[in-house]
Image (tube, rainbow, N blue to C red):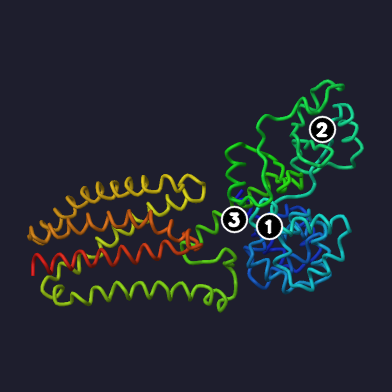
């Protein structure tokens, strides 16, 4: 797939250089909307609007919903507004709900005027819930029948429909009060006897989401139970919509991208081909934070300037201790962030995890203390120096393990993204502890 995308990008660049609009339109018609979105994101800033403007209007909205937030923001700002509004009207309700928050208010008003009353009503239901909730993810296109009808009646009802929604694998049964009473697989509908009641063929212990369930919990359940679609109910158990696997895949990808970018201090909407001033501005703050943490480490070192002058070997070996602590801590931090995200780590097992990671840090500390202490003693022909390095290694690896567990838990309680703040905080702690333990022990024992 990557090779195909590379070939398509090369072909797109050639078509744009030739300036033949008809050829560009024909090329884009042969591309899936997701591929067109990839091509837009891979193109230089000035060429993106031309590409999107030449996508068929019925597919242009599909391209929008696949774009990175930063690129989407540019398209929304620079394209002709009438075309933008029309393209959005071709989207499903849940996709319109995803794009609405990115639009200026006057464009939102135009979109709401352009869609029909039923779509507007359904869109209002979705937008009433937080974006990162089951209600914000759902679509209102669920196929619903009463739970007191026969298989034959249900089949005739489906035949009357002009079209069925995508990822249609279940029919939702409701009682006379519109309360969800069961979920019937489509294969049961096809294979059961026509005179049987639909309620005789419902799924045992179905997965049902409340409108306020968090999207990461929804994604975990879809993954654990291999779901294609699932119903969403309100606080009164009334069916309000359904979530489908395509929406959940988007959540999983977005969460993974956000976590990866956050470790480098970048936002999810970071655009790799954005103008230089904009990119520099987005990254400057994080570089400033890293500078402050580096200065803290330097401040610790400066307090032991006399010790370093007397024993130059300390300057050579200190970075090794800090680096080992940082790497060990990042390993723990990554595992804990993942555990918090998928629900493996709960209030009841936190201290079990703390003890376990402290033990792992201690064991690794002893192993590498022996190795590094021996290397230092032989390298500088100083057994005392080797002992200092060994003790500092144990101290820093234990502290890094504890920090890797406790920092993300603390940040989560403070409603701070652990992936964003954890790495910098951990690096600061391991650097400071590493430098302080080496220099402090050396000043105490050797000098």
**In the picture, residue 423 is in which quadrant?**
bottom left
Residue under the image location 73 percent in, 55 percent down: 33
- Cα distance between the residues tagged 1 and 3: 11 Å
Q: Residues within 10 Å of mark 1 (few under 14, many from 20)?
A: some
- Lateral position of residue 416 relative to residue 130, left or right: left
Q: Residue at x 80, y 72 (%)?
A: 81
For the residues labelled 1 and 2, say whether their Cβ atoms are less than 8 Å apart.
Answer: no
> Which marked residue is nearer to the observer: mark 1 or mark 3?
3
The one nearer the camera, 439 or 86, is 439
Residue 147: give its label.
2
Residue 15: x %, y % from top left:
72, 63
- Residue 313 x %, y %: 15, 67
Kindly report which numbered mark, 1 or 2, lies closer to the viewer in this rendering.
2
Residue 66's disc is: 1
Q: Describe residue 242's horizontal placement relative to residue 414 as left or right.
A: right
Disc 1 to disc 2, C-alpha distance: 38 Å
Q: Mark 3 or mark 1, which is nearer the start of the sequence? A: 1
Residue 86: x %, y % from top left: 84, 64
Classify 417 as above or below 159.
below
Q: Compare marks 2 and 3 and give the one earlier in the sequence.
A: 2
In front of the other: 99 or 217: 217
Contact between labelled residues 3 and 2, with CB atoms less than 8 Å apart: no
- Judged by depth in the image, the label closer to the viewer, 2 or 3, is 2
How packed is label 2: few (under 14 Cα within 10 Å), some, or many (20 or more)? Answer: many
Quadrant housing the C terminus: bottom left
Q: Earlier in the sequence, mark 1 or mark 2?
A: 1
C-alpha span from label 2 to label 3: 37 Å
Label ID, residue 254? 3
**For numbered disc 1, what is the local secondary structure?**
helix
């Amino acid at each position: 797939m990557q090779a195909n995308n590379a070939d398509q990008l090369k072909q797109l660049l050639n078509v744009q250089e030739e300036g033949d609009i008809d050829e560009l339109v024909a090329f884009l018609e042969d591309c899936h909307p997701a591929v067109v979105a990839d091509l837009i994101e891979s193109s230089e800033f000035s060429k993106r609007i031309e590409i999107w403007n030449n996508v068929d209007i019925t597919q242009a909205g599909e391209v929008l919903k696949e774009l990175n937030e930063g690129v989407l923001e540019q398209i929304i700002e620079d394209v002709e507004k009438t075309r933008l509004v029309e393209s959005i009207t071709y989207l499903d309700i849940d996709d319109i709900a995803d794009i609405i928050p990115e639009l200026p208010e006057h464009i939102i008003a135009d979109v709401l005027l352009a869609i029909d009353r039923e779509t507007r009503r359904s869109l209002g239901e979705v937008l009433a819930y937080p974006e990162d909730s089951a209600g914000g993810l759902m679509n209102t296109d669920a196929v619903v029948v009463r739970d007191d009808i026969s298989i034959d009646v249900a089949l005739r009802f489906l035949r009357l429909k002009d079209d069925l929604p995508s990822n249609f694998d279940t029919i939702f049964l409701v009682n006379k009060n519109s309360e969800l009473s069961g979920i019937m697989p489509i294969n049961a509908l096809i294979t059961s006897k026509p005179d049987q009641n639909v309620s005789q063929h419902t799924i045992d212990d179905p997965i049902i989401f409340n409108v306020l369930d968090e999207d990461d919990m929804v994604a975990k359940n879809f993954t654990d139970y291999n779901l294609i679609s699932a119903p969403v109910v309100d606080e009164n158990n009334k069916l309000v919509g359904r979530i489908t696997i395509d929406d959940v895949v988007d959540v999983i990808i977005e969460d993974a991208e956000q976590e990866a970018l956050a470790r480098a201090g970048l936002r999810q909407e970071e655009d790799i081909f954005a103008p230089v001033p904009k990119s520099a501005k987005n990254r400057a703050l994080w570089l400033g934070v890293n500078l402050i943490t580096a200065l803290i480490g330097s401040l610790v070192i400066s307090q032991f300037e006399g010790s370093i002058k007397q024993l130059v070997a300390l300057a050579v070996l200190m970075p090794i201790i800090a680096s080992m602590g940082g790497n060990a801590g990042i390993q723990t931090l990554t595992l804990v962030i993942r555990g918090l995200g998928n629900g493996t780590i709960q209030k009841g097992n936190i201290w079990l995890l703390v003890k376990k990671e402290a033990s792992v840090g201690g064991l690794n500390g002893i192993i590498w203390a022996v190795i590094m202490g021996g290397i230092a003693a032989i390298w500088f022909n100083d057994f005392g120096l080797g002992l200092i390095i060994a003790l500092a290694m144990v101290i820093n690896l234990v502290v890094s393990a504890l920090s890797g567990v406790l920092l993300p838990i603390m940040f989560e309680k403070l409603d701070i993204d652990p992936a964003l703040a954890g790495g910098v905080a951990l690096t600061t702690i391991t650097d400071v502890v590493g430098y302080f333990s080496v220099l402090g022990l050396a000043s105490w024992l050797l000098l």
